[in-house]
Amino acid sequence: MSPQPRTAVGAPLSRVDGRLKVTGKALYAAEHDVDGVVHAVIVDSAIGRGRITGIDTRAALAHPGVLRVISHLNAPKLPYRDNTASNNPPGRRLRVFQDDRVLFYGQPVALVVATTLQAAQHGASLVEVRYDAERPSTDLRQAQADEPTRYARGDAEAALSSAAVRMELTYRTARNHHNPMEPHATTARWSGHRLTVWDKTQWIVGTQTELAAVFGIATQAVRVISPFVGGAFGSGLRCWPHVVIAAMAARVLARPVKLVLSRRQMYFGTGFRPSYDYRLRLGSDRQGRLSAMAHEMEAETSSYEKYTETIMPAGQMLYSMPNVAQAYRTVPLHVNTPLYMRGPGFATASFVIESAMDELAHELGLDPIELRRRNEPAQDESSGLPFSTRRLRECYTVGAREFGWDRRRSEPRSRREGDWLIGMGMATGVYETQRNTAQARIRLNADGTALVETAASDMGPGTYTSQTQVAADALGLAMRSVTTRIGDSLYPPTPPHGGSMTMASVGSAVLDGCNQVRQQAIKLAVEDRQSPLYGVAAQDVVVRGGRMQAQSDPDRGETYQRLLARNNRPYLESLGSFTRPSGPERHSFYAYNATFAEVAVDAALGLVRVRRMLGVYDAGRIISPKLAVSQAIGGIVGGIGTALLEHTVTDHRDGRIVNPNLADYLVPVNADVPDIEAIYLDGEDREADPLGVKGLGEVVHIGVAPAIANAVFNATGRRIRELPITAEALL
Ligand code: MOS
């Protein structure tokens, strides 16, 4: 098979769906018009733990337009079969309206369905729920932890006790909520025993299998439609209770039902990044060579599911050291279950490890980059495997040069401009390269256009555009000749649109399908006596602009259109696939970055302003450079939030979240966002997947918070080990 010229992949193209998005023609979950739809509003629990002792629905039912109030008193019992093809953590998932138990504040306890949204909202306010309340346990620091998951190599305790330099540091991170712009929403419709949902989801197949399991119907009886997702950051990676509620209501009422979570309800209904208490002890010699790290991590989970995330790998493989000990404990609380949020696990681990590295560099009087260089491993010391690619040294070199790192003063609090203390900091980021089995259907039409269909999602990174780029090159077509359709369970299945695995997984399936279709066309041509390509070796044929031609004699060739017309073929089609490699890996796959920050801190007020940020990324081949830079900007903006603003606050007396809105839960706005620069190292990872990509959506976020924290230390001499870094903490 001759290689195709690359013209679309690697080109800085704009989004193919950009016009649809800015003209409002891209339909999000709540915007699909479904005939006869009625509206549902959730009544959520006003206690954090206990039992429902009564529900008075008379006033609600008397309100004009209200059709039904559903609660555990009258809800159908649902099978809730186990679903292994899901992101449901181990445990017993929340079963909506199946009993009188309240497990967390804000849990759905009833549903009002009405002919209009307004009637449903008012009806919900009229439902009176009586409770028998118990005191919830919602404080990570006050509750009993589960048994730990452990990792060890060498003898960390012995190494720590004999280390020339020893540090013992405790860090805390706040609970963060995803807060995508688009709220979660579901419209559900039954036709007999078949269920269709228009849903905000990052995993079409996951939502499909979960609804099938909950309702005890065949997977194929559920159709999930989700063509556009207005941000998610992980909140759409599992099928939440409100999706089940919408489907249940549609069945009870025998009408389509639309359910949109309020911003407030998103804080109780769609997961969060758990808060951590993280104690790190490290030992090194006087030259900064690490001998040991001991990590003790405690993180929130719910009382009914044990959510865990990849908090452990970074501590095992990022730096070279013979001795590592880790203990990771979840702490069950009366909260809803956490879920992956951008760079899950790694982002938190990186805040801790990268802050500690900065502390060690300061202690030793070493440049923070030099310290990291001295601890660069030759292989993955957790597995003994070679790195597929690891270009962290280049990230440091390029980053230091481009950011002007030589202008940093190593002595903290030594640069001042009027009221402002100026500082620079950096951190390393790492995220695992994941890829999973995926499929895509490719059809090359007789008119020379092509159609790509796959059940992938696009929460914003640009799936439509990047898959179109891969297909255009592999088919030898112009971008405008290729249409990509995603977000429908009728299309071939894909893994979760998360963990930065979409390009490697779905992209490789699209590549495979397009290669097959191109080969079909070439075979047809070289075996067709009437084709100018008759008798040419198939591997000598490439396709450019829809025209197949012999590389050895470019005058010999013809278009797809002519070939298919002459052969009476309406289209050529193939099912492309990518199969996750089975058996043990032979390489260690990670994406990396070096992230740099410059901050100004008001010496009197403690206000932190991020002035500049730069990320330099080793993420393998970059399919879509313009969108990759957008991803980096978004990841850095999110990191500014984690570092300085974002904090979900719980009132431990009753378990209520006191700031469940965008006025009190702070996220960066334009005034908080400085000039951001992103540099992707040119290259590819030949071991990772057929496209050579390593994933970039997560890694761009990781390392941002510690880079800012380290810059704050450089500016002020104050080491803040608790996120977010607030003005109060700096006073
Ligand atoms: Mo991301 S947490 O994988 O959506």
Image: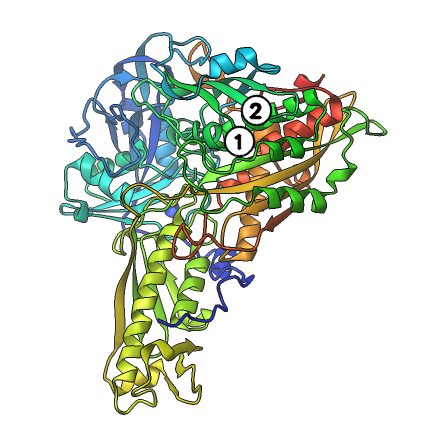
Depth check: give the residue in front, 304 or 628: 628
Q: Is residue 578 left or right of residue 414?
A: left
Q: Is residue 166 visible?
A: yes
**Quadrant (top left, top right, bottom left, bottom right) of the N terminus:** bottom left
Query: Seen in the image, is 506 located left or right of residue 399?
Result: left
Residue at image coords 42%, 12%:
654
Above or below for 319 versus 26: above
Give the colour scheme shown. Answer: rainbow
The image shows residue 318 at horizontal and vertical percentages of 51, 33
Disc 2 secondary structure class: strand
Question: What's the residue type where badge 2 is placed?
Answer: Leu
Q: Tell me if label 1 and label 2 are in contact, CB under 8 Å.
A: yes
Q: Which residue is mark 1?
A: 319
Q: Position of residue 85 (x, y in %)?
A: 24, 39
Q: Earlier in the sequence, mark 1 or mark 2?
A: 2
Specify the label residue 343 is tagged with: none
> Which label is found at residue 290?
2
Q: Position of residue 285 (x, y in %)?
A: 61, 20
